[in-house]
Amino acid sequence: MIATANAVREELWLKTSIEGCARCQGDIYQCAEDSPKDIPGNPWFISTLWLVEYAIDQVASQQELQAAIPYLGGCGKNALPSGVLAEQLHPITGSPLGVSPLTWSHSALVWTVFRYTEKGKTFQ
């Protein structure tokens, strides 16, 4: 499991200013024509949050847990002004792509914040 999570992070994490995790290598669903050719696909809120959730489950201290905050903040940064989360994002501009709002993205964020909060309680 650890090796798989590390491989997902290495292979599917976008190294753009938007960051986030693509859902699979070579994913062309909703890819814009101006997307860089060297990325695995567009960043999806759901796959990004799955990776964050896994990381939260693995932490062993409050300090390690704090490392998840920027990833959760990235959801807010990439939400529409109304707070709506799309299905996925343009990898460079961060503009919403696909379905918007996507209930699945919102529920994944709520669940991940819940997991973060619960994990934090174990260090008190």
Image: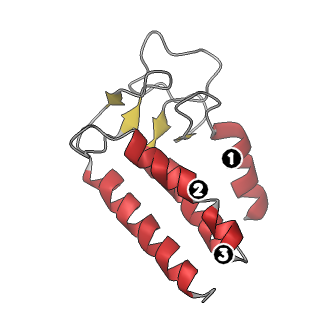
Residue 123 image-quadrant placement:
bottom right
Residue ID for mark 1: 9
Residue at the spot x=23%, y=43% of the render? Answer: 101
- The dot on residue 62 is 3
First-in-chain label (1 vs 3): 1
Q: Name the amino acid type tagged 1.
A: Arg
Viewer-side residue, 28 vs 35? 35
- Does residue 75 appear to the left or right of 1 in the view shown? left
Residue at the spot x=68%, y=47% of the render? Answer: 9
Q: Residues within 10 Å of mark 2 (few under 14, many from 20)?
A: some
What is the spatial separation of the Cα atoms under label 1 and label 3, in whole angstroms? 22 Å
Secondary structure beneath dot 1 equals helix
Q: Name the amino acid type tagged 3.
A: Gln
Position of 12 relative to 104 (above/below): above
- The dot on residue 51 is 2
What is the spatial separation of the Cα atoms under label 2 and label 1, in whole angstroms? 8 Å
First-in-chain label (3 vs 2): 2
